[in-house]
Image (cartoon, grey):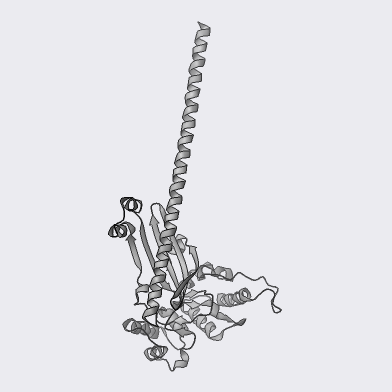
Amino acid sequence: MTTTRRQRGAAILTAMLLVTLVAALSAAALWQQWRTLEVETAERQRTQASWILQGAVDWARLILREDARTGATDHLAEPWAVPLQDAKLSAFLASQGGGDAALEALQEASLSGQINDLQARLNLLNLVQEGRPHSATLQAVTRLFDALHLPPTELQVLVHNLQLALEPPDTPTATNQPHPLLPRSAEQLGWLGLSPATVRVLRPYVVLLPERTPVNLNTAPAVLLQACLPGLDAGGAQRLVAARALNHFQTLAEVVQASGLANLATVDTQHSVNSRYFEVRVRLRLGTLDTQERTVVQRDGLLVKPLWKERLAPEVASVQ
């Protein structure tokens, strides 16, 4: 009897161990299958997002190309300056006769975006020309720092480090100091010695472009107009913004007339009424994926080509 009971107990224990082993293997297989499905779903969403974002950038390039046909000036009343609010892609597909599968896959997808004129900002690369600080640009940046209540000592650090960044290391005049990296966007101005607080305040008003560019007086904000136009105070800058809202400037002479500046020499090659560089910001929400991208494009006549693209972090993407 004792032997029989021991055998029954061993059999029950073996059965329990087998059940536990089968349950563990089943759970592992189920988890692996779930993980594979999630990875496949995420990869499919990323692929779909990439194609949709690329299509949005191509559409923005087409808008800028058609805008080049209509006139020689760029201003804030043109179609490219109107932001695209959140739009459901499923509604667009329905209006185009999309299939049920496409509507189901993109039911919750939404797209928003905006085209910004990068020449509505002050190009910091204008600060250094032929290895030396450019006087007119330095004065404009100094007035901008004063208007934004930024420390002037950081402007000196900015100019010095920008000279080093633009100086080839193998030139005879090169110093023994380490050369900082040249930033590609305003968010990276900390590379040139600016504090995070200064970068945050300065970011909406400056840009770094691959060549020297004038400021578009049709699109620049009032604080930048005050900084870029010597002799223009805050009130005059606001009046200039109000005047261009009624009728955008066709020539620099109209800017002089509207601002009350002494002569056309005040508005020189550092300013313009048109632009060649733009920024396309696109945000796509597709399922659990929230993707935001920024693409810098250059327009030469009817040719609109992308220069570089980057994914945006949420805190950076919120700054327009």
Asked if residue 171 lies left or right of residue 314, the reply is right
Camera-side residue of 207 and 58: 58
Q: Vertically, is 30 above or below 317? A: above
Residue drawn at the location 40% of the way across and 74% of the way down: 64
Q: Count the marks: how many?
A: 0
Q: Position of residue 205 (x, y in %)?
A: 46, 75
Position above or below: 144 against 50:
below
On the question of residue 103 being in view, the answer is yes
Q: Foreground: 167 or 305?
A: 305
Q: Quadrant of residue 218?
A: bottom left
Residue found 50% across the figure and 19% down from its top: 13
- Quadrant where the C terminus lies? bottom left
In the displayed image of the protein, which residue is found farthest to the bottom? Answer: 263
Percent coordinates x, y for residue 81 in the rendering: 37, 73
Most extreme residue toward the top, as rendered? 1
Residue at the spot 48% in from the left edge and 26% down from the top edge: 20
**Percent of width and height locating residue 307:** 50, 70
Q: Nearer the viewer, residue 262 or 281?
A: 281
Horizontal side of residue 312 vs 179, given as left or right: left
Asked if one can make out residue 107 in the rendered structure from this viewpoint, the answer is: no
The answer to which of 63 and 153 lies nearer the viewer is: 63
